[in-house]
Image (spheres, rainbow, N blue to C red):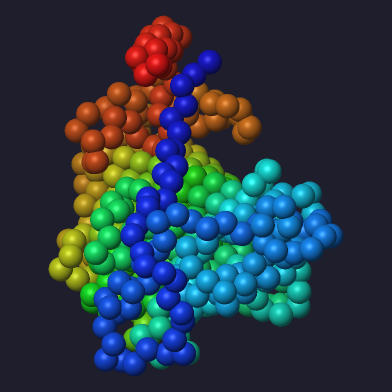
């Protein structure tokens, strides 16, 4: 019996809004982005529309009379409720896959949420399409904001037979707020969480767009992916050049690479990387790499476990450095893989590295002693049996557990905490019981 550290999933906080704003055909360049967003605040309560692909009666989008396909619900949302509709499209798991691409149009904001289990969304066609797609503002007037999409409790696959780089989901998913709204970033409104993405060996998991926005709202843009599982993807999460992203608490299993952040900034709609944090993730059996990223300002990898990955587990490639901060690598466990990490010599003045554990690696890169606090002890996992409840958790006596002075105030290395000894479990259960009684 053990206490497992979980991820607290925050509900969307209420925000104040006037009536729904009808979508204009375009916004003139001189119109302030701030004014647009302040007119299009999200509603105080998410409206719900329902989808059930086994329903045969009249369709109204309600729980009792749901739509029968997801795109119909999206189209109804956009046509009837207008821009930034603040709608949750509740997708009932019926045991039958939801077929076809889901396209969310520009200046729209909604969530796709699975219920009654985890429904499967899949594209089987011959066209080069992503299964879930945020429309982008590349081909629209520059003041038209892109679609914001949240994904929750879904299984998403892409079976397209078309060649090329395709994904289960290609979206922009803010987790923060528009101007004049006080929601703290710690309480996500959008984001991707509790989803499973299967790339079937030749497709990517999630591509996170980050389209350049006006400086008035730039600081509010942050993509968020947490508590998801990525399997058989060419890359689990791919980031286009972006302002900010947080990727944490995920399992990347048998992918080509787990996280890729190496896109060139080659468009007026894209920004150089900055403020990207990848932490508390398991990267297991990645054939190519755990993480590939440029040495960009504030590209930080910490408290991840790289388990039996091929290639070089972390590759810092030269990027365009700015004044905002260095790239960092802290508190990670590299175990039984090919090689731990490398960087370009020219970038070492912008790297901060500390307290990583390297054990049973196939080859040394020469970078293992860069920084400080490097360890070579066996990590002493509680279990190395896939599927076991304690798989890749640390034993309580692990040399990687009960540490101090680590980056971010962590008390252990790697993604998962130590398993408490039996006595500690009893104490925690007693304390939990006392807390529950105090609440009653």
Nearer to me, 143 or 123: 143
Residue 32 picture location, percent across and down: 26, 83
The residue under the point 49% across, 19% down is: 2
Left or right of 169? Residue 219 is left
The residue under the point 40% across, 63% down is: 42
Residue 230 picture location, percent across and down: 58, 52
Q: Examine the rendered structure and indicate whether residue 174 appears above or below residue 424.
A: below
- The answer to whether residue 288 is visible is no
Q: Examine the rendered structure and indicate whether residue 418 appears above or below residue 347.
A: above
Residue 403 picture location, percent across and down: 27, 27
Q: Which quarter of the picture shows residue 26?
A: bottom left
The residue under the point 22% across, 29% down is: 404
> Furthest residue to the right?
56
Left or right of 179? Residue 259 is right
Q: How many numbered callouts? A: 0
Q: Which quarter of the picture shows residue 166?
A: bottom right
The residue under the point 76% across, 69% down is: 124
């Amino acid at each position: 019996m053990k206490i497992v550290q979980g991820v607290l999933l925050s509900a969307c906080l209420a925000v104040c809004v006037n009536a729904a704003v009808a979508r204009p055909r375009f916004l003139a360049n001189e119109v302030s982005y701030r004014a647009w967003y302040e007119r299009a605040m999200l509603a105080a309560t998410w409206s719900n529309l329902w989808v059930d692909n086994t329903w045969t009666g009249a369709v109204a989008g309600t729980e009792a009379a749901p739509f029968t396909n997801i795109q119909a619900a999206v189209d109804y949302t956009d046509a009837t409720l207008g821009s930034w509709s603040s709608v949750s499209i509740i997708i009932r798991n019926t045991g039958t896959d939801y077929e076809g691409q889901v396209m969310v149009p520009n200046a729209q904001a909604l969530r796709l949420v699975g219920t009654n289990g985890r429904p499967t969304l899949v594209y089987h066609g011959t066209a080069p399409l992503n299964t879930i797609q945020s429309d982008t503002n590349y081909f629209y007037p520059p003041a038209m904001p892109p679609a914001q999409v949240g994904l929750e409790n879904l299984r998403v696959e892409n079976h397209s037979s078309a060649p090329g780089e395709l994904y289960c989901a290609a979206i922009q998913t803010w987790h923060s707020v528009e101007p004049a709204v006080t929601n703290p970033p710690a309480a996500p409104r959008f984001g991707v969480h509790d989803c499973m993405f299967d790339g079937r060996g030749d497709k990517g998991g999630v591509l996170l767009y980050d389209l350049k926005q006006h400086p008035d709202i730039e600081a509010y843009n942050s993509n968020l992916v947490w508590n998801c599982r990525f399997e058989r993807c060419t890359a689990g999460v791919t980031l286009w050049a972006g302002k900010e992203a947080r990727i944490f608490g995920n399992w990347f299993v048998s992918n080509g690479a787990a996280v890729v952040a190496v896109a060139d900034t080659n468009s007026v709609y894209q920004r150089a990387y900055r403020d990207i944090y990848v932490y508390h993730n398991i990267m297991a059996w990645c054939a190519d790499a755990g993480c590939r990223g440029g040495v960009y300002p504030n590209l930080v990898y910490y408290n991840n476990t790289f388990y039996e990955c091929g290639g070089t587990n972390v590759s810092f490639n030269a990027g365009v450095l700015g004044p905002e901060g260095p790239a960092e690598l802290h508190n990670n466990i590299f175990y039984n893989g090919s090689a731990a990490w490398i960087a370009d010599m020219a970038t070492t003045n912008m790297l901060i590295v500390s307290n990583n554990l390297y054990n049973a690696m196939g080859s040394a890169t020469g970078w293992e002693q860069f920084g400080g606090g490097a360890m070579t002890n066996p990590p002493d996992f509680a279990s190395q049996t896939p599927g076991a409840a304690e798989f890749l958790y640390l034993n309580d006596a692990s040399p990687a557990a009960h540490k101090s002075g680590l980056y971010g105030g962590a008390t252990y290395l790697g993604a998962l905490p130590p398993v408490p000894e039996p006595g500690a479990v009893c104490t925690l259960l007693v304390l939990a019981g006392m807390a529950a009684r105090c609440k009653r």
